[in-house]
Image (spheres, grey):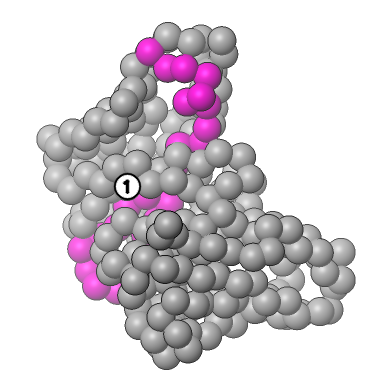
Amino acid sequence: DGGITQSPKYLFRKEGQNVTLSCEQNLNHDAMYWYRQDPGQGLRLIYYSQIVNDFQKGDIAEGYSVSREKKESFPLTVTSAQKNPTAFYLCASSIDRAYEQYFGPGTRLTVT
Amino acid sequence: EDQVTQSPEALRLQEGESSSLNCSYTVSGLRGLFWYRQDPGKGPEFLFTLYSAGEEKEKERLKATLTKKESFLHITAPKPEDSATYLCAVRGVWDGQNFVFGPGTRLSVLP
């Protein structure tokens, strides 16, 4: 089955620790994205990548980092510099940045 | 700046009671308007893309329509399994633009 996988589903970390969220897709999509979802707000774009070895900051990139070494994979690192890291994180992919995006199941990160 | 608003924030319907959700948008040239369904604790599921005013798309009990300023998601004779949050997003025509998502409408269909 083609799709997007994110792991883990739930993640707990202590304040001050970096944490990496996994995102893998087998849809052969060129573009991949990371969003953050908070209650009562729309999805906010953290980073996106159009091709391997290239990525761009979204609206709320501060405190986050990404890499795109393979077409299938786009991991997100939440660093200790992110002031409010507790949120639901969603990874998505699309054939091209102008077309519909398909989402993974999400990772809920809790930092205490 | 591109913007998307959705109304109502929450909607409760009885099973079989048809209604519509609204998505109003401001974008400098519309490339596409997208509807998603999101169940609690899960990722959004793609429903429709609309490209130009007057376009309509249907899927089971859902029908999406588009004008130059807004889109409606009509739900006909809803069932409890239609309960979810419905998200709307727009993407402008310019290459540097990203998707802009609305906050969603939380729909509850009571049996």
Q: Which residue is mark 1?
A: B34
Point out residue B12 in the picture as x, y percentages from the top left corner: 54, 18
Q: Amino acid at mark 1?
A: Phe
- Residue range of the region highlighted in magenta in the rendering: B77-102
Point out residue A20 in the picture as x, y percentages from the top left corner: 67, 77
Say which residue appears at 19% left-offset and 41% top-offset. B68
- The answer to whether residue B86 is magenta is yes
Is the residue marked by circle 1 packed among few (<14), some (14-19), or many (20+) residues within 10 Å?
Answer: many
* Relative to B12, B89 lies left or right: left
Q: Nearer the viewer, residue A96 or A3?
A: A3
Point out residue B37 in the picture as x, y percentages from the top left corner: 45, 39
Q: Is residue A109 above or below residue A48?
A: above
Which quadrant holds residue A14? bottom right
Q: Quadrant of the N terminus of chain B?
A: bottom left
Say which residue appears at 31% left-offset and 56% top-offset. A100
Say which residue appears at 39% left-offset and 86% top-offset. A52
Q: Quadrant of the C terminus of chain B?
A: top right
Q: Is residue A77 above or below residue B102?
A: below
Q: Is residue B61 above or below residue B84?
A: above
